[in-house]
Amino acid sequence: MNDIQNPAASAAIQGRSPWRAAWDSLRLMMQDSFAVAGVAILILFVVTALAAPLLAPFDPFKAMMTETGRLARLRPPSGEYLLGTTAFGNDVLSQFLHGFRVALLVGLVAAVAVGFISTVFGVLAGYFGGWIDDVLMRITDVALSIPTLPFSIVAVALLGPSIENIILVITILFWRNGARIIRSAVLTERERVYVKWARAAGASHFHIIMRHILPNIVRVIFLWVTMSVAFAILTEASLSFLGLGDPTVISWGQMLNTAFSSGNLRTAWWWVVPPSLALVMLVSALYLIGRAYEEQTNPRLRRR
Amino acid sequence: MAASTPPRAGTRPASAATLAQLAELNQRLAWKPAARLQVEGLSIGYSTLRGRFHAVEDISFEVPAGTNLGLVGESGCGKSTVIKALMGLQPANTSVSGRALLDGQDILGLDDRGLRDIRWNSISLITQSAMNSLDPVYTIGDQIAEAIRAHERVSRATAWARAEEMFALVGLPAGRLYEFPHMFSGGMRQRAVIAMALALNAGMLLADEPTTALDPIMQSQIMTRIRGIHAHMRRSMILVTHDIAVVAETCENTVVMYAGKMAESGPTADVLERPLHPYTMGLQNAFPRLPVPGAPRQPLISIPGVVPNLLLPPPGCRFASRCPFATDLCRTTAPPVVRHGAQVATCHHTDRSEEFRAAAARPETWRNMRGAA
Amino acid sequence: MTDRPTIAPDAPAVIEARDLKTHFQGHTGLINAMLGLKPPTARALDGVDLRIREREIVGLVGESGCGKSTLGMSLVRMYQPTGGQILYRGDEITKAVGRQLKDYRRQAQIIFQDPYSSLNPRLTIGQVIEEPLIIHGIGNAAERREKVIKAMELVRIPAADNIDRYPSDLSGGQRQRIAIARALVLEPKFIVADEPVSMLDVSIQASVLELLDELSRDLGLAVLYISHDIATVGYICNHVAVMYLGRIVEEGKAEDVLTRPLHPYTQRLMAAIPRMDPGEATERVELRGDVPSPLAVPPGCRFSSRCPYTTPLCEAVEPDLSDQPSGQRVRCHIHDDRAARAHPELTPPRPGLVTETADAGILVETLDHA
């Protein structure tokens, strides 16, 4: 547990570096078979997303033609089109593979933005309390009263359907819960005796936040970010399914939308199943990781 | 639970029927004799991720009917574990062996039903943190009355009247029965828990650190109540504490525990005046006392070292690593239980206790072994 | 622990409180504010004079809620006093801010009760002790390390084995030593020790007390030792102050206050302590009720609501601290007839004359009935 180094060897006092801490918790997490499954799925998805242009046999927007020069509409999977074709003659496999990129891009960018904003709001409100807390939390309350779906529909319709706008909408929608969760974690940390002591020793607020508050709530932030990735991906899919997706890119939600609007949702299973399955798997993988991480950092949930 | 009762300042006038039932209940409860408890070879083991260990190992003692027994030791010595096992409150992954005969009935192997029958009725508990043993959503009066009605077939009004009497007994105004636990101060809450423990006049009271975390005035108030109750109602009691002065003032007999084992036991006066076990000697020296006018001040001596890890108990005596008198024998062989008159000690060298007592009073004896520990 | 070094009575004070007051304002609701109702004020600390000199350990005792921790927190400027003065070596720092406050924070340190939550579990012992040096920007990494090792030696925790360990690897007594080392690394002149041993086992309490005693001797520290365990106060303190409801009711040399208390409250406080030897036990006088709330401080003597000797004078006029022939200072009309002479119409209390009956009667009566 504690590897004692020779104190004379290094002049400066070393603590556990954040990388080392992250590595330690990752290693601990890997003892959980659910977490391993989650991480494996995630890695597979990331690799697929990166390699999508190489893996995809066709251009996702290209309409496939038969030898007779007609549109290759709604072909079931075959040797030529591994996952069949859409009603507009596009190759499903190629669209599906490109969908990985959008899903992960939206998920990652939105989650990082959500994590950042929630942390800033939560830490400032929780740590300083008083009127700062009042003001920030009232803003949060207002944000919390925004209805999710109507707001996203109206916002995307007004701003125009693009990936950037969808990420913006998702960020606006999900920072609010995170801010509350992080604030309550900060409220607990703020009352620790070592925080009181640090104030008595003359430490600045910045010092206390960076050294005593943040390191102890990293797990809460990480958990929220993981969950946000899942929320973001689902929200993007929902918006695209409603026809508010970015028309210039292919996402899973959009694939489902097209299948639905062309009236083939019930018949063209090869068109519907891959994006649905991928969505479920990706979101499940993220939940599995989040749950395992929480279990590992919260001793009360530890099953050992 | 019963219909909520509005908070009132005074007590509610009792009907004649209630008074008659109360008198009958009081008489029935007053007939309950004090219980006798014999604990024989009690061992309590936990299994954890890092292996199995014994929190308590082979403890034997007796509480004769109508006496107080002090169970003394430092945190982690297993004293609270003993109390939990006697109440059947040990966690699920615990193995308990040995016997605990309460008036001849073994209470260690009881099933849920059996436990329900004896709890409050013949053995009751005064816990360390009163807040945790009271339900925050019911009034204190409701809780005491329910405990009475769980065991005695009496009307709610009678049970409530009995609760009022118990409150008077611990010096709380009856009107406060209508209040909720959070409206009480720490000391008052502790008294309410005592009132609850007394409500069925159980023959055996287990008091688990009843005054820890209270300031001296509160502590004295609570202990005065407990002593008064003991004197008047002649109940038997086990008092778990780390404060040997409280034991000296309250208990006829004392058991000193160290690292899950019994170090010494016997009549309190003997144990404190002529301790046989070096740990008892060390504990006495380390205990702060008020200065006595005119008398030279006794030095305060700490016991060096730390309690051994119970997962890897040392092969010999568990106190050997901190004992200034330890020999090679102590470090290799578990000491026998030696009887000296009424006193019992688990030590290889009880025959040299007189010499040890003289040496233990000198700070150098303990200080010199600091390097070793 | 032998006798404490004697402190010259005219030695300059390291820290001094003059009529120090810390009142806490409750919250007013919106409706109350509109109705013009003032929020309740808790007079936690209500006019305390105290001086601590070099090498002196002053014990502060009293029931929970008497304001002793508030005094400690106010002296290190964790609470902002609402009145009076705090002087550090003659300089007033009551309202110091910025640079001056930070300088003062370097000189005055505090040790808290709970050794389990006072150290950040994510930092190594070395980092914990180094932190105050970083806060005050002292030295480079190597110099800081040297100071940390020195501080660990002072509290007798071997640096080589422990500097890279985590607090969870240490016992309660060792953690409290680390907390002391962290306080010492800045070489302060004044330390507030707020119940430093009350959560430790009896067998190791002594070693921490001994450490405080030695440090005050060797480093010339002024220490305020706050405790409700009055017996421990007798071992390390030169001077003892007894607080009741925000004020000092008795103070004097430790031996005098602990063995010959004059104030009725101190007498009861001392009598409440369990004695080891049956022969030592004094007559146990039970102190009734709880401390009155600092939100509603009684007029007159603050102890009058619980004192057995209370008379109309006590209920009307608050006594001042008066010097006694035995060297103590006591806040009680029994030992000071100035107020009685000023108010001849009010009956003064007399020593030993009990004016109120105790409630012990209820106990005996009910028990006989049961």
Image (tube, helix red, strand yellow):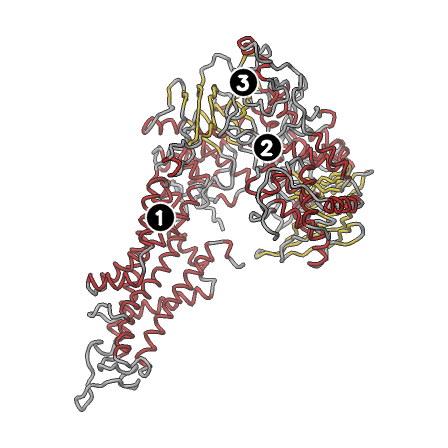
Residue topped by disc 2 = B215
For the view shown, which residue lies furthest in the left direction? A69
Q: CA distance from mark 3 to mark 1?
A: 52 Å
Same chain, labels 3 and 2: no
Residue topped by disc 1 = A122
For the view shown, which residue lies furthest in the bottom direction? A68
Residue A147 in the image: state x and y as whole percent: 32, 59
Residue C352 in the image: state x and y as whole percent: 67, 17
Question: Of helix, strand and loop, which one carries label 3?
Answer: helix
Q: CA distance from mark 3 to mark 2?
A: 29 Å
Relative to B227, say whether B153 is above or below.
Answer: below
Same chain, labels 3 and 1: no
Residue C319 visible? The answer is: yes
Q: Amino acid at mark 1?
A: Gly
Residue closer to the observer: B128 or A265: A265
Relative to C330, say whether B20 is above or below.
Answer: below
Residue topped by disc 3 = C316
Q: CA distance from mark 2 to mark 1?
A: 38 Å
- Tell me the subunit letter for badge 1: A
For the view shown, which residue lies furthest in the front direction? B16
Picture quarter containing residue A7? top left
Same chain, labels 2 and 1: no
- Tell me the subunit letter for badge 2: B
Picture quarter containing residue A40? bottom left
Residue closer to the observer: B337 or B24: B24
Drawn side of residue A150 relative to residue C123, left or right: left
